[in-house]
Amino acid sequence: MNEKTSAYLAAVSMAVIIGFSFLANKVTLTTASPWAVLAHRFTFSFLALIILKMFGFFKFRLKKEEILSILPLSLFYPLLFFSLQILGLQKVFSSEAAIIQATTPLLTMLLAAVILKEKTKSMQKIFMLISLSGVIYISVMKGTDLSRGSLAGYVLLLLSSLSSAANIVLIRKKIRDHSFLKLTSVAITAGFIIFSTINVIMHLAEGRINDYFTPLMTPSFLIGVMFLGILSTLGTSLLSNFALTRLEASRMSIFNHLGTVISILAGVLILKETLEGFKIIGAVLIIIGVIGTNYFAKAHHKAAQQPHV
């Protein structure tokens, strides 16, 4: 398997996990607050990271200089991305949030052009917009009413998307000096410390510190948060960072849209939801956009490698 193929498989696998994470989030948020979900999510992610390291699956050593170099990225992911997302979701409908956060690939493309000097062809931009239109179409047909949302919520979610885009671009830049395993490990550890601290402070402020681990006594919450922590946090971080070692930032980020398609399939297969025609149309647009974006990116990359006569 060549490097590009393995990168594409990693990106698609990431999209599949993201798609199923929507279901896991629904389950966990019925039992605990968003901050508690994040704290337990990153706890399981951190524990999985430690176990993998102990059993020799991850063979690397982090130097103090490397930690200091990588740590600033944690400001964008996980801190700003998740914090802004949670605060934004409390003010707008989830369908509206899907539209706003679907702008991440476009924001990534713009930042990559400025910071990494990545160039995208016109056809790539067109297919990226086609993919975005699929997400918007599904969200609108599900009953989005943008006038009912809070402007503050839209701004927070847009900033969350911008944080995600910045993280993708900066990792693409840092990956030249640090392995994707080191980048992932620092982000997961930072998330564990940050969100666990926030959750402890909130429990102390409410006088309920004894209830810190209570949500874990609910089987559905435990299974859901383990999925979110081990696969949806650690797993997707590893897959995303690995893909960024071989794919441009703008090409990798477009795979996030596939998560919408997977979440639709998961809803139909697991929750027995109805597969309406508009979902099929939107899913087709998303898939066409993802394929087209990467096809023309490959063509552009090959043309760039041709010797000039």
Image: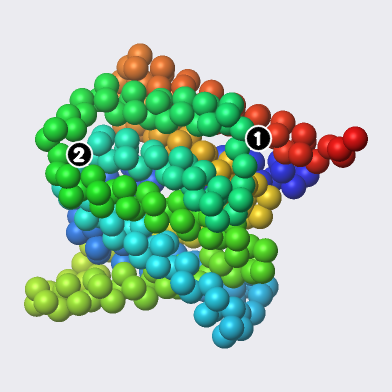
Task: Give me the disc on residue 297.
Answer: 1
Task: Give me the disc on residue 132.
Answer: none
State the residue at coordinates (21%, 67%): 214
Residue 210 image position (x, y, % from top left)? 16, 77
Q: Earlier in the sequence, mark 1 or mark 2?
A: 2
Residue farthest to the right?
Answer: 309
- Viewer-proximal residue among 56 and 36: 36
State the residue at coordinates (52%, 26%): 126
State the residue at coordinates (77%, 36%): 302
Residue denoted by label 2: 93
**In the figure, is residue 194 to the left or right of 115?**
left
Residue 6 image position (x, y, % from top left)? 69, 45
State the residue at coordinates (16%, 74%): 203
Residue farthest to the left?
Answer: 207
Q: Quadrant of residue 81?
A: bottom left
Query: Mark 1, mark 2: which one is toward the viewer?
Result: 1
Residue farthest to the bottom?
Answer: 64
Secondary element at tag 2? loop
